[in-house]
Amino acid sequence: MKRRSFVRSSIIGSAAVAIIPAITNAMPTNISAPTHTDYYELKVYSLKNDIQQKLVEDYLNNAAIPALNRAGLKNIGVFTEMKPEGQTRMYTLITYTSLDQVDHIAGKLEADALYQKDAAAYLNAPVSAPAYERIESSLMKAFKHSPILATPEKKDRIFELRQYQSASEAAGKKKIEMFNDQGEIDIFKRLGFKPVFWGETIIGPLRPNLTYMITFDDLAAKDAHWKAFVGDAQWKKISTVPAYSDALLVNKITSTLLIPTAYSQI
């Protein structure tokens, strides 16, 4: 090696050795990768009148949420429809850190004397005056690219719950691949949608489907964000790949606008 080249390489190498520790020391030390994958239980209460709604709301606010919090579950979301057709349905979102936690929660509630006391009117509602018409439940597993719940800032906002149904399991998996591996989730985050969760329904109706929740300050912000998404160059690039055509992967999309209750923890 010529002396001039050797000296230049030595200087560069020495500088790199000095810079790398400085960069490492400057990086935040409190950032760590998630150690688990969340599971989400979405419960939808169908109600026929204000009496049932009040009974369910009193149950959730005064009995269910406190008991779930005591059992170690946090960030319980409760929402009403922004534009209901008749009596609003009520949506609850419960986050679990494992399937084992899902398995044990019912037993913990049964053993919680305070919960049984506070929930008595709801749990023991007579057949002549039921607390609700029906409950529809789904259990979802978080996407690998967004494995844990993201709780938004507590302020006035609206939520959009979107579900994509697919005609086959293969098509459903391909759509999830589009979100995880082709950068679709990153587009949502970059454009400021502030997603709360992304989940594949593993138990529940209308399978195969995926469901996700995003937030906006108001309806004007919702329209502006979706306009930006449709016009985004990266989205256009992904969506024009023949294998990822929505016509092949999605046969129904539902969108529900939700408002958090005063006691919702999301």
Image (cartoon, grey):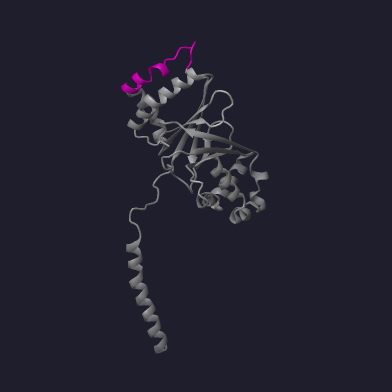
Horizontal and vertical percent for residue 180? 53, 49
Picture mark count: 0
Horizontal and vertical percent for residue 198? 50, 42
Question: Viewed as shown, does residue 144 lie left or right of 116?
Answer: right
Nearest to the observer: residue 13 or residue 263: 263
Span shown in magenta: 113-130
Q: Is residue 42 magenta?
A: no
- Tell which residue pokes out farthest to the front in this image: 220
Q: Residue at x 37, y 73 (%)?
A: 16
User: On the image, which quarter does residue 265 sit in?
Assistant: top left
Q: Residue at x 56, y 45 (%)?
A: 176
User: On the image, which quarter does residue 206 sit in?
Assistant: top right
Question: Viewed as shown, does residue 74 lie left or right of 91?
Answer: left
Q: Is residue 126 magenta?
A: yes
Is residue 40 placed above or below 126 in the rendered structure? below
User: On the image, which quarter does residue 65 sit in?
Assistant: top left
Is residue 93 placed above or below 129 in the rendered structure? below
Q: Residue at x 41, y 23 (%)?
A: 59
Quarter in which the C terminus is drawn: top left
Nearest to the observer: residue 103 or residue 189: 189
Horizontal and vertical percent for residue 34? 40, 48
Horizontal and vertical percent for residue 194? 48, 46
Quarter in which the N terminus is drawn: bottom left
Nearest to the observer: residue 190 or residue 24: 190
